[in-house]
C-alpha cells in the first residue's frame, strides 16, 4: 500500500473543517499540472516496530494518465512504476517484480483519486474522499483527504497535503494501524534532517516557504 501512496506529491492536518465544495474545487483545480511532472522527495516512515524512522529520497513523477513512478536514489536505487493496471518494482541487480492492481481493488480506487488530484479534477477526487481544507490558494493551505471507501479506510486513515499557493510542499500519510509516512517535496526535500522526528517535520511543513 505504501508503494502507491508514496508515488504522490503532497501532505495534511486533522484539525481542518470540511471544505465548501466551491472552495475545495478551486484549490484542487489550481494544483492541476500538465504531464509529465516531476518533483524531488525525501520520505521518513515512522513504523511502530522500529525505534527510528526509515528515510529515503529520490524523485516522484506523474507520467500522464494513470502512470505514476517513484525513483529512490538513496540509500539504494529502486524504481516503482504503476502503468496500464500493473505495478512494477525494480532494484539494481534483481529481476523486476510485477503484480496487477486487480489483486488489490483498494489500490485502484486510490490511484484513480490521486490522478484526479494531480490533474486538478476535483469532482473525481470528491467521489473517493471527503475533502477538508484550511487556508486558501493564495497563501498557506492544507487539504485533508479522508477515504469514503471502507476497504481503503482499513489501511489509510487520512492523507494530508500542506502547500503554499500552487505548490504542494509535504504529504502526511496516516495509516490506520498508526504508522506514518511524511514526504517533503520539491525544494523542501533537501531540508530533510539527518535524524528526523515527527515534530521537526511538522515544523518544516507548516513553516514559511
Image: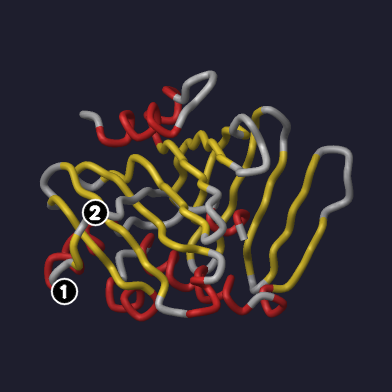
For marks 1 and 2, give the one nearer the viewer: 2
* Disc number for residue 172: none
Quadrant where the image shows the N terminus: bottom right
**Residue 28 position (above or below residue 49):** below
At which x and y percent is residue 103?
72, 77
Camera-side residue of 10 and 46: 46
Quadrant where the image shows the C terminus: top left
- Mark 1 or mark 2, earlier in chain: 2
Camera-side residue of 7 and 178: 178
At which x and y percent is residue 54?
62, 34
Camera-side residue of 101 and 155: 155
Q: Is 56 left or right of 172, judged from the image as shown?
A: right
Mark 2 neighbour class, 10 Å CA radius: few under 14, some 14 to 19, many 20 or more:
few
Q: Which residue is found at the position 20% from the left and 48% from the top?
A: 141
Q: Is 9 left or right of 52, judged from the image as shown?
A: left
Between the C-alphas of marks 1 and 2, the distance is 18 Å
Q: Is 45 left or right of 76, judged from the image as shown?
A: left
* Disc number for residue 15: 2
Mark 1 neighbour class, 10 Å CA radius: few under 14, some 14 to 19, many 20 or more:
few
**Residue 125 position (above or below residue 192):** below
Q: Is 16 left or right of 175, judged from the image as shown?
A: left
Q: Quadrant of residue 86?
A: bottom right
* Disc number for residue 21: 1
Amino acid at each position: 500500500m505504501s508503494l502507491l501512496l508514496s508515488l504522490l506529491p503532497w501532505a495534511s492536518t486533522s484539525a481542518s473543517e470540511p471544505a465548501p465544495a466551491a472552495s475545495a474545487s478551486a484549490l484542487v483545480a489550481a494544483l492541476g499540472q500538465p504531464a509529465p511532472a516531476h518533483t524531488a522527495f525525501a520520505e521518513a516512515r515512522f513504523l511502530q516496530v522500529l525505534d527510528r524512522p526509515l528515510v529515503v529520497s529520490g524523485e516522484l513523477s506523474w507520467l500522464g494518465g494513470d502512470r505514476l513512478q517513484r525513483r529512490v536514489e538513496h540509500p539504494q536505487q529502486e524504481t516503482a512504476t504503476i502503468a496500464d493496471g500493473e505495478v512494477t518494482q525494480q532494484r539494481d541487480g534483481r529481476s523486476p517484480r510485477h503484480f496487477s492492481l486487480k489483486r488489490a481493488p483498494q489500490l485502484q480506487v486510490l490511484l484513480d483519486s490521486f490522478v484526479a488530484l494531480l490533474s486538478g479534477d476535483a469532482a473525481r477526487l470528491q467521489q473517493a474522499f471527503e475533502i477538508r481544507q484550511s487556508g486558501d490558494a493564495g497563501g498557506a493551505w492544507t487539504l485533508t483527504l479522508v477515504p469514503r471507501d471502507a476497504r481503503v479506510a482499513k489501511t489509510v486513515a487520512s492523507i494530508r497535503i500542506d502547500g503554499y499557493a500552487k505548490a504542494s510542499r509535504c504529504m502526511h500519510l496516516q495509516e490506520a494501524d498508526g504508522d506514518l509516512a511524511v514526504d517533503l517535496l520539491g525544494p523542501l526535500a533537501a531540508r530533510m534532517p539527518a535524524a528526523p522526528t515527527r515534530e521537526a517535520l511538522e515544523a518544516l511543513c507548516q513553516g514559511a516557504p
